[in-house]
Amino acid sequence: MIAQRLAATLSGSEIIAMYGGLGAGKTAFTRGLVKGLGSEDDVSSPTFALVHEYRGKCPVYHFDMYRITSADDLYSTGFYDYEGCGVMIIEWSENIEEDLPDERIDIHIKYISENERELTIEGAREI
């Protein structure tokens, strides 16, 4: 699985910005990445919690920015407190793109069909 191969290249402090519409597979990709980082935690969308934390070889912070519409909203999530403390995976990154650091991994997921997705990964080491 691509997500697990990407996990093997991570040092533990990356920011991963995920892009894709509803049902594209952002949470499913995150599930594979978290598993690849050695966690057996159940991964679910943090839509209402805004952030979920998973433990493995390094901490993983899984954010959902679907409802974030302003800098104040972003600040209130505690987002900036997590930088450098583990891998940050951010769903709906398009909502906070201007606040993301240049040094990051971008993952674009396009829904093709029920069992097919098109993935574009930028900023990652060779996987």
Image (cartoon, rainbow, N blue to C red):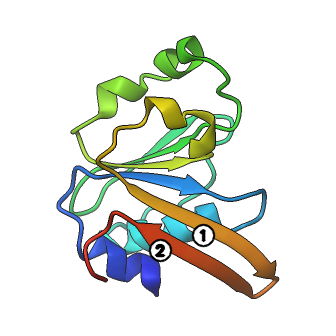
Q: In the image, is 109 to the left or to the right of 98?
A: right
Q: In the image, is 111 to the left or to the right of 36?
A: right
Binning the other alpha carbons within 10 Å of mark 2 as few (below 14), some (14 to 19) or many (20 upward) gives some
Mark 2 lies on a secondary structure that is helix
Residue at far right of view:
113
Q: Position of residue 73 (x, y in %)?
A: 59, 17
Residue tagged by mark 1?
28
For the C terminus, the quadrant is: bottom left
Q: Position of residue 46 (x, y in %)?
A: 60, 44
Residue tagged by mark 2?
32
Q: Are marks 2 and 1 in contact (CB under 8 Å)?
A: yes
Tell me if residue 105 comes above or below residue 25 in the rendering.
above
Binning the other alpha carbons within 10 Å of mark 1 as few (below 14), some (14 to 19) or many (20 upward) gives some
Mark 1 lies on a secondary structure that is helix
Viewer-proximal residue, 58 or 126? 126
Number of numbered markers: 2
Q: Residue at x 72, y 67 (%)?
A: 24
Residue at far left of view:
11
Q: Residue at x 44, y 76 (%)?
A: 3
Report which quarter residue 41 is drawn in.
bottom left
Residue 42 appears in the picture as rendered: no
Q: Position of residue 77 (x, y in %)?
A: 50, 23
Tell me if residue 105 comes above or below residue 69 in the rendering.
below
Give residue 69's mark: none
Q: Position of residue 117 (x, y in %)?
A: 68, 81
Label 2 – label 1 distance at C-alpha = 7 Å
Amino acid type for the residue under numbered disc 1: Ala
Amino acid type for the residue under numbered disc 2: Gly
Report which quarter residue 110 is drawn in.
bottom right
Q: Residue at x 32, y 72 (%)?
A: 7
